[in-house]
Image (cartoon, rainbow, N blue to C red):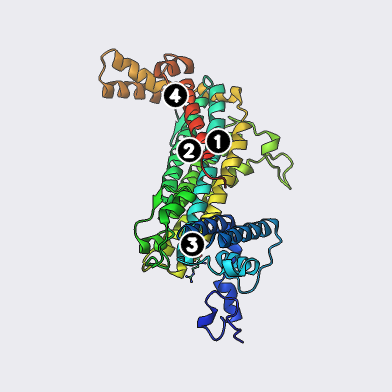
Amino acid sequence: MPTSAKGKLYSARFQEGLLPELEGFSSSLEIDIELAPYDIAGSIAHARGLQAARLLTKAQLRSVEKGLKQVGKEIASGKFVFQESDEDVHTAVERRLTELAPDAGARLHAGRSRNDQVALDLRLYCRAASGALVSALAALIAALGEQARRHAATAMPGYTHLQRAQPITVGWHLLAHAEPLLRDAERVRHAYAFADLLPLGSGALAGSTLPLLRQRVADELGFSGLTANTMDAVADRDFALDLIYACASIAIHLSRLGEDLVLWASAEFGFIQLADRVATGSSLMPQKKNPDIAELIRGRSGRAIGSLMSLLLVLKGLPLAYDRDLQEDKIALFPAVENALDCLEAARLLVVNLAFDSERLAQGLGDPGLYATDTAEQLVGRGVAFREAHQRVAAAVREGRHQPLWGAERSLELRGLDTTSRVTALEAEVAELHQWASSHPPF
Ligand code: ARG
């Protein structure tokens, strides 16, 4: 039985309401309720803009602000009473505001559509999420840097193709996991810059006849500029896509760190000993201590890639300007951000608790093959052509008569991999990231 469209923002156009079976299908409230703080901040800024344009009186603005703050409190405290007709967060907030301040509340949506409103909310969310991601990245990079400094001189075998290659240090290896995360922080900041434009004023797709003060609203919300095209502004989700890509990139990098830790914790490598506080056991096998956290970090990269594909596919071939398909942006974006934040923190805890087994590392370093490249380079230093040197040493290795000229310490010294200086530079970059994150809106 169709119900009446009463309570809907568009009820006057309809004689009957959406089939009850389709209400739930259409609603995005369960997911977009997370946008409530941004929706309220955006509406307050919009109302101030309306007042400055003389479309609201000062008294009406005051009651809109008071009402919106009250709605914010009700939602945050869980006291907000949702109604069937609340199809999304924007509808729910406006409906409740209008109950609290009937006259002023009814004026708030002037010059605005839910299309530019949701674009605004999502941009505010992305800006806040970027700050949280950058500070979580900085915390993990700092933890890697600390362990790297501690192990700047702890030698270990380095691998290519998962075969012993040349000696490196534990510190250098850990820094190789920090560098991609630094690049991820740049990716997040790029995504932030794309989100940092005000879409309000675009209306449904074509702007508004009202004298809206866009720059004033942008200043109010701390945006660095205005979107240029009204149709693009309601259709564009590139800023969300870029942030999800940054989250996917983080997840991929963490999966590689997770994989290294899983390998190192195995009896075959034995490079680290898992602290009880970051390991789990088996319900059946009494002897087991498993690196589940590292495995979960590795596995969770699947979610991140899923989110990225999901939004890319929503956007593919979508006609301009706004289409309801875009509602699916949030189910891709929010879990991608949460997943990245969870994995960054779990990885940080693993890194802080890393304990290396110097005996097992030393055992690995006893493999003479690790020094074969040094031997060949030594010959080059004495004037032998590199190809000739390579052949000579390879033959010695094959016949089991290759004698390393020196051990790991000398080999590392000659190659000058300077972990300590890089950690010092990294610490300055971490401080800059923290500074950036703290000067941007809280999540
Ligand atoms: N809930 C929608 C979304 O998340 C916003 C509302 C726009 N709906 C509309 N029928 N114009 O995209």
Q: Earlier in the sequence, mark 2 or mark 3?
A: 3
> Dot 3: what SS?
helix
Give the residue at mark 1.
140
* Residue at numbered disc 3: 117
Q: Which residue is identified by label 2?
A: 181
According to the picture, the residue beneath numbered tag 4 turns out to be: 370
Name which residue type carries label 4.
Leu
**Label 1 CB less than 8 angstroms from ligand 1:** no
Image location (x, y in percent) of residue 38 = 55, 55
Where is 144 relative to 34, above or below? above
- How far apart are the alpha carbons under marks 4 and 3? 61 Å
Pair 3/1: label in front: 3
Q: Is the residue at mark 3 in contact range of ligand 1, meaning its CB lies under 8 Å from it?
A: yes
Distance of mark 4 from mark 1, alpha carbons? 31 Å
The Cα–Cα distance between marks 3 and 1, rounded to whole angstroms, is 35 Å
CA neighbours of label 2 inside 10 A, class few (<14), some (14 to 19), many (20+): many
> Mark 2 against mark 3, which lies toward the viewer?
3
The answer to whether mark 1 and mark 2 are in CB contact below 8 A is yes
